Amino acid sequence: MFRRLFSIAVLAAVSTCNCAAGPPGVPFPPDKLPPPPILPADFAGWRQAVAPQRSTAPEAADQANAAVLHEYGFAEFAAANYTQPDNKLNVRAIRFQDATGAYGAFTFYRRPGMLKEDIGSDGAFDGAHVLFWTGTIVIDATFDHLTAMSAAQLRELANDLPKTSGPTSVAPPLPKYLPITSLNPNTVHYAVGPVAYARSGGVLPPNVIDFDREAEAVTANYTTQSSDGTLTLLMYPTPQMAIHQQQTIQTLLKTGNSPQAAWPQALADSNEASLLVRRSGPLIAITSGSFSVDEARKLLNSINYSADITWNHPEGYVSEASKTARLLLGIAYLTGILGAAAIILGLFFGGGRAALRRLRGKPISTLNDEEFISLKLR
């Protein structure tokens, strides 16, 4: 009877533990464990007032732009309030799957008029509002009031954020092709999907770009002495895809219509002479706005795709016959080296022993030695 009651008690305790942890009999999967917190508990004299808010839903980070965050590869959102004796700080952090998403989200939330700030990989501020990104994380910080040490404190926060390595830590290369001359840096917007592209001021119809082909797009405004306009750069996985899209875009710019979309208002307001297209490898560059023909062509001609090629062998391609010949020669060289080493060691040890026997008054060779020692007991 006692054993039966004990067994029932044990089963009840196990069932209670299983209900608290999850469905009965189903262990909590290790890959579903929450990742380490994005925001530290304290940094540079700031301490969290309450436990941070965390969510894996993009709506929690920005309900109006949840689709944009999804295109950039949203992974997690966290928000925390920090305090100092005479100041308060609200920090919102969004983690993405890679640095491409973090950079794109940073350019999406950065607004014209914000001043550049050296925090993380890139930063900008407007009054007490500071925006920066580093690794796969975008930080949106708002102070009660700025101090002379606010930027330095956020740099410490950037150093305390989780680090990434490998391919996920590499920023997209497309923005590097933007010419620097006459560029308005705060107008650079990077997109990998139609929603982010349209909401960040893209001048082309998203359907013409065809983001389903893994296209990337970056737009930027340029201001010259006599005019201003927009430069759009598109990158595709292969030059063949770029050639196809170039033809579609040229049809749109010449006729005002295309199989995918009609003439947008941003292009309708542009000077007809500024609507030019140029391709370089997988890159497509489009100018629009009030550029003159010379300004548009100069801007397009400054964009040239460069492919980095790394050879596994400095001498280039090596045939199988050459590899076999080199292997046989290597074996012959090794055999000769080992044979020479054996001869040298034999002369050294054999000659040394012979010299030692001669100094002791014995024959050089041991052939004349007695084969055994006799005690001669008689």
Image (cartoon, rainbow, N blue to C red):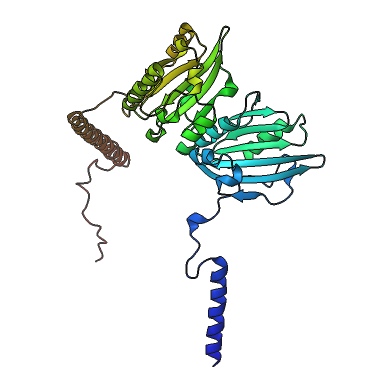
Which residue is found at the position 36% from the left and 22% from the top? Answer: 246
Res 292 visible? yes
Closer to the camera in the image, 330 or 301: 301
Q: Is residue 45 left or right of residue 193?
A: right
**Split into 4 quadrants, where in the image is the N terminus?**
bottom right
Residue 27 rendering spot, x and y as whole percentages: 49, 65
**Split into 4 quadrants, where in the image is the C terminus?**
bottom left
Closer to the camera in the image, 297 or 308: 297
Residue 358 rendering spot, x and y as whole percentages: 29, 39
Q: Is residue 234 left or right of residue 230?
A: left
Q: Determine the residue located farthest toward the bottom in the rendered image.
A: 1
Residue 91 rendering spot, x and y as whole percentages: 67, 41
Q: Is residue 304 above or below residue 9?
A: above
Q: Is residue 38 left or right of residue 195?
A: right
Which residue is found at the position 66% from the left and 33% from the top? Answer: 155
Res 281 visible? no
Q: How many marks?
A: 0
Q: Quadrant of residue 312?
A: top left
Residue 288 rendering spot, x and y as whole percentages: 48, 16
Q: Quadrant of residue 112?
A: top right
Q: Determine the residue located farthest toward the right in the rendered image.
A: 86
